[in-house]
Image (cartoon, rainbow, N blue to C red):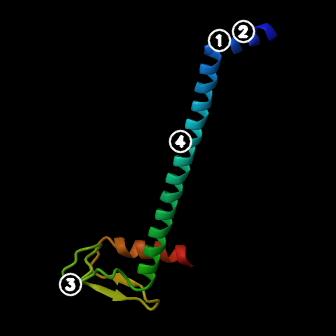
């Protein structure tokens, strides 16, 4: 066994194998770092989006609502509940109402 190692060390193939192994390890580490950063950024974006949505709903609805807006159930026809949450009154499927209840359940 030592003779084989000695022979390998004397050949250029040994150094080529070492360089390839080191390159592969460095590549794997760099790819893992990029993946971790991408996942971290995605998590931050999702958390910020959820927090902003909860704040918008709890604070009284979408600030972009106007009389010409046609969002969920039409923003032009809204009323504010006793807790200060906007309710869409022209929503035949109660989509906004269900969403409001979902958000309120998550907040409380």
x and y, in percent, of residue 3 in the image: 79, 7
The quarter of the displayed image where residue 91 is located: bottom left
Q: Residue 56 location in percent, x, y?
A: 41, 80
Please state if 79 lies on the left or on the right of 82 as rendered: left
Q: Are marks 1 and 2 in contact (CB under 8 Å)?
A: yes
Could you tell me which quadrant the C terminus lies in? bottom right
Residue corresponding to mark 1: 11
Q: Are marks 1 and 4 in contact (CB under 8 Å)?
A: no
Q: How many marks?
A: 4
**Of the image marks 4 and 3, the number of the one nearer the N terminus:** 4
Where residue 74 is drawn, which disc sits there?
none
From the image, state whether disc 4 or disc 3 is nearer to you: 4
- The spot of residue 61 in percent (x, y) is 37, 82
Instruction: Please report the residue visible at 49 percent of the width from the left and 52 percent of the height from the top.
Output: 38
Q: Is residue 31 left or right of residue 73?
A: right
Name the residue beneath numbered marker 3: 67
């Amino acid at each position: 066994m030592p003779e084989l190692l000695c022979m390998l060390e004397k050949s250029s193939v040994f150094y080529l194998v070492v360089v390839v192994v080191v390159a592969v390890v460095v590549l794997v580490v760099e790819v893992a770092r990029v993946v971790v950063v991408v996942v971290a950024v995605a998590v931050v974006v999702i958390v910020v989006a959820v927090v902003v949505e909860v704040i918008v709903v709890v604070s009284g609805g979408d600030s972009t609502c106007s009389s010409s807006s046609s969002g969920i159930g039409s923003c032009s026809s809204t009323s504010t509940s006793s807790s200060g949450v906007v309710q869409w009154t022209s929503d035949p499927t109660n989509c906004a109402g269900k969403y409001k209840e979902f958000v309120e359940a998550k907040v409380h």
